[in-house]
Amino acid sequence: MSIRNFWTIFKKDVAVGPRSPFVLFAILLPIALTIVLQMVFGDLFAQKPRFALVDQGSSQISLLIQDIDGINVTMLSDPEELKQQVQSHDFDAGLILQPGFDQALKGGEKPVMQFYISGESYAIDRLILSVTAIDLIRTVEGSSPPVEVELVSLGRGEALPISMRLVPIIAMYAFIIAGLFVPASSLVEERERKTIQAVLVSPAKLSDLLAAKAVLGIVLTIIMTVVTLLLNGAFSHNQLDMIVVLIVAAIFWSMLGLVVGLLASNSQILFAIVKGSGALLFAPVIFYLFPDWPQWIAKMFPTFWAIDPVWQILANHATLADIILPLMVTAGMSIVLIPIVAKLGRRMLVQLASS
Amino acid sequence: MGAQVSTAGMIVTLLKKDFLAFSRDRIYSILSLAALILFIVVFWIFPMTVDESITVGISHHDLGMLLDADGEEGIELLVFPSEALLRSVISGDAEAWIGDDGKLIIRDVTDGESRPSGASKATVLVGLSFPEQFIISTAMGQQTTVTVYTNQDTPPEIRGAMVSFIREIAFMLAGSPLPVTEPDAEEIVLGTDRMGDQVSMRDRMRPMLAFFVLMMETFALASLIAAEISHKTITAILATPAKASHVLTAKTLFGTMLAMGQAIILLLATVSFSADNWLMLLVAVFLGALIFTSIAMVVGSMGKDFITTLFLSMLFTIPLAIPAFGVMFPGSTAPWVRIIPSYGIMQVLMDVTVYGMSWGDAWIYLTIAALWAAGLSAVGLTILKRKVVRL
């Protein structure tokens, strides 16, 4: 294999490839899917209540409120700025704590609660922020609540919003379209347009051509999966580990793309292969949506091993050490695909020679 | 010798050529049309109303008057006949449905019961179970235990708020007044109180959709200019009586007409125009089209192939999307966003269509946008002219 030939073909694919509808599809689909799925199920348009606080003394409230989960707290310095930003709905509500607020509270002086609500804030946000503020004030005052409140979490395991469970579906689309479809369709297009013969009569070998197609798929897959994860707020944990996982998964999908591209002699067959195997490729991600289903079934599908490490990092904050098994399986599947690609490549050369 | 062609005639001819070239570019002509249809469909798919409340399941024995908390804005109480049923709904083993008569229907999903006809499903995010004698015991200073049931769909802020809410009820029952002086209700709410009449996501989406339309046309025009430069079509044009100024004028007009035309179609399809606001909206989209056309000229002059043009277009236009996001998610953007060229346009599109902004308030945004449009046009034309002359 010649690096120079590989690089020339790769550059050509990068320059010409984007005109392919599959590349545009690979770029647009994860973004469109994110918007649609998050719009229907998700958090994209459901913001957390936003609370502004001006602490003119050094109230305990400004410390306690930082520990409250699910509320975006911003500390401001100027009371007028707080009122202005609450009015313009930059915040749902705001609280101004005048100097000596805590002392006045503890001394029973009933200081004025300078609490402001934005006219555009939602009713539920108003309720959340006002009861939270009052609860904190009671805490600082030193009142012990006359009731015990027991929090019981029911259902399956840790809280995980449905929007997060949808991420593997969108990521799987990025894998299939960018990783599998782009190299496969690029190969098929070259065969249909007979440009592959032109390439192969040059000093370039088939291995250079296949490597260029695979690398295009790998690069596009990694970029689009990272974009997908970023759009879904799922790229905040163990980013380096996630990048490693994406590289391993992208290699597997591109190898699979080469197999499909070499098997299909024209676009119709390519579509038939992808359409026919679509359910098998996609099946594992459905199990993330339905955690009650027997999860061992998902492991029967080869593509499970390529998507599960992504899921483990985003849902369980796993590290590479935790997901070494699925990673090894994915890498192993890629290695197994190498001789298959080589064999199919030789078969294609024979077919081209005889055509 | 042919007759002399007037400047206007020359520009019209060049404009026709540009429109023809655009219609022949299958990718962008199809994408432009498909995107425009998609944006209009997306607008109408988005919810028109805003649900400001959550449904809270409750099981109790003798709460009586406390159930008036249903009057509490932001909470809709759903009374369950037993704690066991409440638990089963929160845990996902059963579903809560509201019948036509307003009565609660419990559907056991583990048994595969069919959906009750004529009923609507209630999403119960959190359940509160009050013990017997809660009111009397609390009032007498005896501590009781209230259970808050949550599941994986309960947001953390709701969990915390429910705990605080119950504590406050208990404080009230125990006769502990608030340790602070509450200000007057009128002083608390700043700005127009829109509770029950919130701006829907559909309305908030409008500036974003307009931005996407303008962005698409930036891609299209930049691609067209890049192709003309790389294919040396412009050199061929300049060999005719057409001058560089004719080409630049035609490009500016073409880009502005293309972008503005589609933005107007979008605004018409989203029923944005009214007798009072149409001129303000037209001025806003005209300035927006001019800004994006200028960017397309810069990108088109720099782009050598499809991917470079696409990449540069994204690089220049994505920052312009920030104000549109800011309109969709108030409070999510920093103050410096106001210096972005598209800020005034997005603000006018939002405030005019939703809040009925007048010229008195809009002029400052439009003036700043006009200055940006003039500045960027000068930059775009200069860069393109330099490129054209050097070819």
Image (cartoon, rainbow, N blue to C red):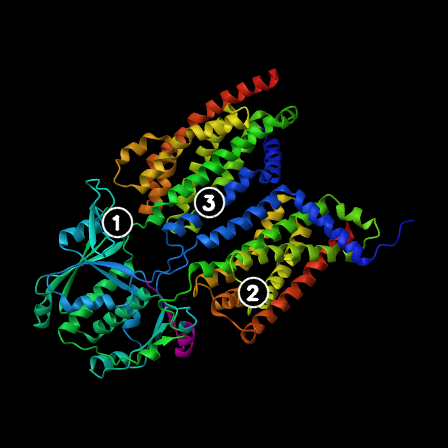
Nearest to the eye among marks 1 and 2: give it. Answer: 2
Q: Amino acid at mark 2?
A: Ile
Part of the protein shown in magenta: A71-85
Q: Kindly identify which residue carries mark 3.
A: A30
Q: Residues within 10 Å of mark 2 (few under 14, many from 20)?
A: many
The reply to whether residue A235 is visible in this rendering is no
Q: Secondary structure at mark 2?
A: helix
- Give the letter of the chain under mark 1: A
Q: Nearer the viewer, residue A280 or B48?
A: B48
Check the image and name the residue furthest to the top.
A354
The reply to whether residue B33 is visible in this rendering is yes
Q: Secondary structure at mark 3?
A: helix
Q: Kindly identify which residue carries mark 1.
A: A158
> Which numbered disc, 3 or 1, marks the residue that appears first in the sequence?
3
Q: Nearer the viewer, residue A83 or A240?
A: A83
Magenta includes A80?
yes
Q: Which x, y percent locates residue A2?
A: 59, 29
Nearest to the eye among marks 3 and 1: give it. Answer: 3
Q: CA distance from mark 2 to mark 3?
A: 28 Å
Residues at discs 2 and 3 both on one chain: no
